[in-house]
Amino acid sequence: MFDRIGRWWRKNAPTRESLEEVRWLRPFAHRILEPSLWRFTRRSVPRGVALGLIVGIFLMIPGLQIIGAALLALPCRANVPIAVAMTFLSNPATTPFILYLSIVIGNRFVHSSADVGTVMVMINQGASIADWFAWLASAAAPALVTGLFVISVVAAAVGYLLSSCIWTAWIAHKWKQRERHRDEALRPEI
């Protein structure tokens, strides 16, 4: 399974060379394209997962999620491709659930009564941006922001721990494969 994911990633992920050609990245290219930020190591991958989840869930604006995750990966020494990929957890299919859950959690933390039903009605009716800003200007904003913060921090912590465990399992798998190949090479032929 890990090999298949790795092949897919190598085939579809943007390369450093392709990003060097992006015009608006040229002023930052020497920082963003630093090789250590693109290596998959046991420390950079979990950092990238956690950072991508925090930015992806808390900052629910699609274009800014990617840019924010990539820029925050620099000082955190996180893997840039992983951080960017994890922002896609919040997508049009998951956003209503994240917003609903964040309002429920935010209501408990802030002790407010932001109406969760209004969010669902606005989503179903395709509310305009002006309607969303009017709703956010009401008492719902503190509950929503608090809920998004709590969900993003919890998701980042779980993602960090889970990716660390997966990384450790993957390395153990690789060592077992290496040992098996070594034993087969040393076994005398009959």
Image: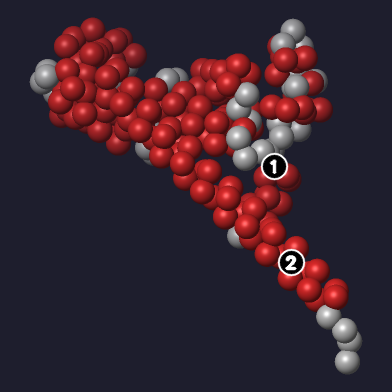
Residue in the picture at 55% in, 31% down: 47
Question: Where does the image place residue 77, in percent across and percent down from the top left?
Answer: 63, 24
Which of the two labelled residues, at mark 2 and mark 1, occupies the earlier sequence position? 1
Q: Residue at x 58, y 21 (%)?
A: 76
Mark 1 Cα-neighbour bin, 10 Å: few <14, some 14–19, many ≥20: few
Q: Is 59 on the left or on the right of 170, as rendered?
A: left
| Amino acid type at mark 2 | Glu
Q: Position of residue 138 (x, y in %)?
A: 18, 9
Q: Residue furthest bottom?
A: 190
Query: Which residue is disc 1 drawn over?
Result: 12
Question: What amino acid type is highlighted by mark number 1?
Answer: Asn
Residue 86 shows in the view: no
For the C terminus, the quadrant is: bottom right
Q: Describe the element under mark 2 as helix, strand or loop.
A: helix
The disc at residue 179 is 2
Q: Which type of secondary structure does the marked residue at label 1 adopt?
A: helix
The image quarter containing residue 66 is top right
